[in-house]
Amino acid sequence: MNHFSPLSIQFVWHPDDSQSVVPIVNYCKKNLSRDQDNPFLRSLDFPIFCFSSKTESVPSPINKMSEKTLVFVFVGTGIIISEEWKKYIFENCENENVKKVYIALNNYAFNLKEIERTNCIRYEEHSAKFSDEMLHRRMFVDISHEIYRWLLESDKHNQLNLFISHTKNDVNGVILAKKLKEFIDSDTRMKNFFDVNDIQAGDDFNDTICENIKKSTLVVVHSNTYSSRFWCQKEILCAKQNGRPIIEVNCIDGYEDRSFPFMCNYPTIRFNDNILDVIELALMETIRFYYCDMLMGMYKENGYLTDVKTFNSVPDSFMINEAEEEIVVHPEPELYPDEYKILSSKKIITTPLSFRKSNIQNKKIGISISDAPEEDMERLGQDGNNLKCLSKILAQKIIRSKATVVYGGDLRPNGFTQFLFEEARIAKINRIDDKKILVKNFISWPAQQFESEEIKKWSAEHMGICKFIRCQAPHYANSITKSAIDEYIWGRSLTAMREEMIDECDIRICAGGKVINYKGCMPGILEEVLIAVEKRKPVYILGGFGGISERICRYILTGELPKELTREWQLDNCDGYSKLIKEYDDHSIVIDYSRIESISMESLNNGLSEEENKRLFTTPFLEEIIYLISQGLRNLYS
């Protein structure tokens, strides 16, 4: 079975060019990947990897785990004069499923024979025309258009075509439509269908319009009378019947007396006299549409979706009525209960990765996902965004399956904890008289001593949403003051909390995790995995994000103990660790790293085959992780 990733995006640049390149890459990542603060927006979610370095040395090899890999190489002077970098780019990146697009940062790039005949994206041409902010946006248009072309590599229509749907009855709509056409014609490599001028003499209006819509993204120029026009309504319906991407540009002046009821369920933007806003939105929605189409195709090829109607966006009532199949599948994320209830009155509505396929109601699922070391993220071409999004996606799926999320950590009235409470509150609203607690938070004894009054009030406010389990102080620590709480007491207390927390859990999910500079007798996720395995709890370990989880996965895969999982390495690399171990020794307590030998493929007991666990150990793709955990849960609790 292939990895569930049709396409990944890689950015590569020399550190000398970071000042020019990083703002462009950050702008692309913002638009092409999931927002960690709003992970359930129906936005693009490409796997994106960035490879540069902090020195002259080349970075790690690019990630080639997806079905297709598109590498954007920013070619500047640093790469041009470095034999090591040229070898990295022109030899190490070679693969039949890898396409490289070169971005020439200056004209010297064309002195390289490898790209002298390549039609590069030309940074200097745009930088001469645009301010910094507009430059980043203009570069994004070229980059995203290349993504679209690579997605449709086998399709002869691989230039994006925009069908500009507008009415001539409204002056402001006509002006906007013309501006859009002029920009596409003069400043992009895209094509457009504008109006009757694009229909040849003697051709049938209806047939020509429908045939063009079938191979286009529909751009609705929504002016005052648009909704009431016959041909405008027909163009909307034709796009929906043929499953085409649609965006709306709202330029209504005043009000309209009635919106066409099927003008819904697609991205909308208020026009503010910036054509780039429209072009960006059209590109993002088109790319999202085709990426989802490929993703759904991969699910079908792998036998995960059968006898279903798949949509590349959330269906509305019109689209559901058009579907002949009983089961309708739309891309992640899942709908909130009220919308789901209305839409599912005629069909079974679901997402491909819904946990509803497993019977985990009333199960308690522990999540231990924390940031990995920065050097791991750099080596893997990632940042912490993926881990934060993964935490929220898993938590939402667990809560919506009527299972309980269990986690341990400090309380903060924002971030992950706040998100959990909001999801649990929504779930409780939709279950009349349901007193069930859907979130349990374990707090170690020392952490309790440092809670502010604000945190205490905030905890009290959410008592009906979350059960706060404040672990008891060790018997020898009852009389200890805050100033006397040392690393030994922290370590003993954290171990006690983890034992109690894992006793409470039916399942554990672990990812990332500190390798050094942690509190406790050993890295936290390592200790949790050891306790869970010893208690025969099902454990899912995600190694694709680095951290101590990656080292555990590496040990299971190879049988060779990574140095970070040894007492000797920890002594050499953790400040104050020798003093901590001496205190444990003084109390006749052994910090036993030989327990790691108890961790094996079989000991994970998680319902996955050896091959599936191997993939879970290495994949950095969120969809595949959710799929594999969902598969394991189905096998454990069918």
Image: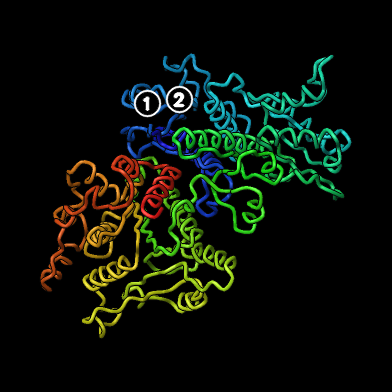
**Residue at the bottom extreme of this rendering:** 479
Q: Which residue is mark 1?
A: 93
Q: Which mark is residue 100?
A: 2
Circles 2, 1 touching at the beta carbon (< 8 Å):
yes
Regarding mark 1 in the picture, which secondary structure is present there?
loop
Which quadrant of the structure image shows residue 430?
A: bottom right
**Disc 2 to disc 1, C-alpha distance:** 8 Å
Give the tally of numbered discs: 2
Q: Which mark is residue 509?
A: none
Q: Position of residue 482 (x, y in %)?
A: 30, 79
Residue found at x 25% / y 65%: 520
Residue found at x 38% / y 36%: 52
Q: Position of residue 290 (x, y in %)?
A: 57, 33
Q: Position of residue 363 (x, y in %)?
A: 40, 63
Answer above or below: position of 89 versus 603: above
Q: Is residue 175 visible?
A: no
The quarter of the rendered structure image containing the N terminus is top left
Sequence order check, earlier mark of 2 and 1: 1
Answer above or below: position of 363 versus 139: below
Other residues around mark 1 within 10 Å, as few (<14) / some (14–19) / many (≥20): some
Q: Position of residue 633 (x, y in %)?
A: 39, 52
- Indicate the amino acid at tag 1: Cys
Q: Is residue 382 visible?
A: yes
Which quadrant of the structure image shows residue 619?
A: top left
Residue found at x 37% / y 22%: 90
- Indicate the amino acid at tag 2: Lys
Residue found at x 43% / y 48%: 626
Answer above or below: position of 47 versus 534: above
Regarding mark 2 in the picture, which secondary structure is present there?
strand
